[in-house]
Structure formats: C-alpha cells, structure tokens
Image (spheres, helix red, strand yellow):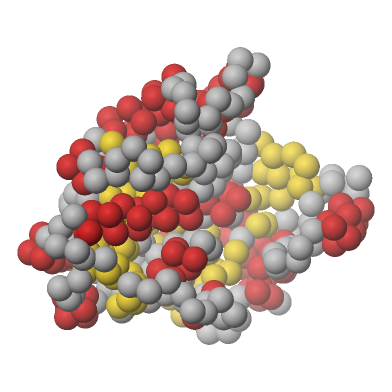
Amino acid sequence: MTNAEILAASAAHEIGVYARQPVAFVRGRGAELWDADGARYLDFFAGLAVNNLGHCHPAVVEAVRTQAAELLHASNVYYTAPAADLAALLCRHSFAERVFLCNSGAEANEAAMKLARRWGSEHGGRYEILATTGSFHGRTFATLTATGQEKYHQGFQPLLPGVRLVAYDDPAAMAAAVRDETAAILVEPIQGEGGVNVPRPDYLPRLRELADRHGLLLIVDEVQCGMGRTGRLFAYEHAGVTPDVMTLAKALGGGLPIGAMCTSSRVAAVLTVGAHGTTFGGNPVASVAAIAALGELARPELLAHVREVGAYFAERLRALAARHSVISAVRGLGLMLGAELTERGAPVVERCLRDGLLINCCAERVLRFVPPLIITREQVDEGCAILERALAT
C-alpha cells in the first residue's frame, strides 16, 4: 500500500482523534524511518520518546521473537517469569522495592493516584493530590484531572474531585497549597508536553522536604523524562532526592506498550489483594522487551553518550538561535530538548517533515526534540541543517 492508500483506509474507518502528519511508516532502523512510498526520514521524535534505543533494536527484537514463540499471555491470575524478572530489575536499578506492571503511562499514573488515595485513607483520611500547571499525566479521567493544561479538559468536565493544580517550579506555592486533606504531590521532574520545562535545581529537593514535613507522598512522573532520556537512567537522580513513587512507560518497552508504578515496600503495603489490577499488566512479550531495553538503557556508556551528544545538540540549537531570531530560548537536559519560538511551531514541523526530518511541536511554540538516544553527532548535524532550512523559509 502507498501513503495515500493507508491514509484513505484510516480516514474511512478510524475515529479521528489524532492530528496526524500525512505519512505512513512501514520500516525503521536505528534513528531512521521509511514510509510506504520509500522515502527515508531522520527521526528526532522517537515515537514520542518511546524508541529510546532506536527502531527495531536487535536485543529487543530477539527477545520478542523468542518469547512470542513460547507464551504470549497468561493473565495475572498466574505468575510468569518475565514479569517477575522485570520487577526485580526495576527495583535493582532504582529506589523501588515493589512494582506494579501495567500497559501505559496513563495506567501507571492512575495506579499511583489510587495508591495515594488508599495510602491517605489509612493515614488520617487524607485524599487530595496536588499536581502542577503545564503538566501532562494521561487521558483517563484521573490523569486528565491531574493534567495542568486546560485544552485537554474541554468537554470532559466535571473532572475528578480531590485534585488541585499548583504552579510548576514554585515550591512556595506548593507549600501554601498543602491542606489537612492533602495526601500526595504529583510532579514531572521535567515537563515534556508542557514545553520541555526544566525546573530550578532546588525544586524537587524542596518538594521532598515539604512532603517529609507534612507526611505526604512524593510521586514523580518519569513516563517521558525517564529511561535514560536526560543522561541519567531516571531524571530524579539529577536532583539527588528519593521519591516515594515513580511512574514509567514509553521507552520502558523498547517500542512495545508497557508501564510500571514503582514504590517502597512501606507505601505498597496499602494495596492489598484485589485493591487494583489489570489484565495485560506484565504481559510476557512486553516484559521481555522491557528487560532487554532496560539492560541496554542502563549501560553507563550509553548514558554518557546521551550527556555528550545532548550537550552537542543543545549547542547546535543555540547556534541556530543566534542566527535565527525566531528561536527565543533553548532548554532541556540530555536528549530531551526544546527550542521555543516567537511564533507557532507547526509550520516548521511540516517543513521539516517535507525535507525528511521528524520533530514535534508542543505548547504551541516549542519545538521538541526527543531523538533516539543512540543518535550520532553526524545525525545531529544532518537534522540541524534541515531545521535551519525550515526556519529560514
């Protein structure tokens, strides 16, 4: 099928909830994709920060191929080795002692919010969750309520009670917002969908102090900024704090859908048998893909590469900003970068697509760059050359 044929088939049968670019991909390798018409693209979007190892990484492909021939699904009525092994690996690489496996970032955050409610009910009857403006936590009703962007709320009110939004990167505002009924703070260490917003260095430490002072849970949403994206395996590591709960998804599965809520034994104890669950959580195929992906993403050499190439990429973007006044700011960490524009970013994204570069615009005016972590300096140079032509048009 051609691009046009695939687009027509989708338009005829799918619900139109996506503002898709007019291209259909059929093959990927590393940081490159090919569409149904045979055109090649350099990928600086990585399937929305999912393909951190690039497309079709050999270790992930082999793990999936082997597992698919042995066991596809069993359900959580029974045990499977891949789920047990993945939970153990996540604990080994993080602060966590207990893991709940699910299918997506929204499910992981939903589980974290339910955990906070259950924990609060057993600690003085507290229930309120404080989230932040500019955040994005998912599309379920609970996670939508915690998402601090009004455009996602339109037409879905009333939202879930017991969630309040507080200004991001403002620890004083968060402190002022705490009430007797507050049970938890939910925050992204770096906001992705909100515009690649990096908070001040003391933000998470001050939230940690606030949580400790009031007996609150500190929940970090690392669905987008985790799994090596910032040059550390988890973004909370940059702040030198230990959260109570962490949520993961996107890059965890190496391209397959999987999510995880990670926490301590003390906090996890409130979720007893029957308190939560999901049919496909810990699916054997998704779990072995995650084990393979995590093994690669945790390598010190890869994390060092992310820091080095991320710094080079940021430097190239700042050089572009010096030549093109349309770029008003460059920010980010590792290979999670944003270039804020003085005008809408969608036309730039479209011009880049036309010339074979995949990028994304968030918060209307921020070009977001979340390429595979394996990209080279040469690919950064190639992408920046295409971007410069798009900016100059």
Q: In this figure, what is the number of numbered marks?
A: 0
Q: Position of residue 17 (x, y in %)?
A: 70, 66
For the question of whether residue 373 can be seen, the reply is no
Q: Nearer the viewer, residue 254 or 156?
A: 156
| Quadrant that contains the N terminus | top right
Q: Position of residue 222 (x, y in %)?
A: 38, 52
Q: Position of residue 247 (x, y in %)?
A: 37, 49
Rendering quarter of residue 12: bottom right
Point 24% across, 35% down: residue:
97
Where is 165 relative to 108, above or below?
below
Where is 249 relative to 331, above or below?
above
Where is 172 relative to 13, above or below?
below
Point 27% across, 30% down: residue:
92
| Quadrant that contains the C terminus | bottom right
For the question of whether residue 73 can be seen, the reply is yes
Q: Is residue 170 left or right of residue 74?
A: left
Q: Is residue 148 left or right of residue 185?
A: right
What residue occupies the far left of the structure in this picture?
213
Q: Position of residue 248 (x, y in %)?
A: 41, 47
Q: Nearer the viewer, residue 163 or 261?
A: 163
Q: Nearer the viewer, residue 54 or 320?
A: 54
Point 78% across, 42% down: residue:
26
Where is 295 relative to 165, above or below?
above
Q: Is residue 32 left or right of residue 57?
A: right
Q: Nearer the viewer, residue 81 or 322?
A: 81
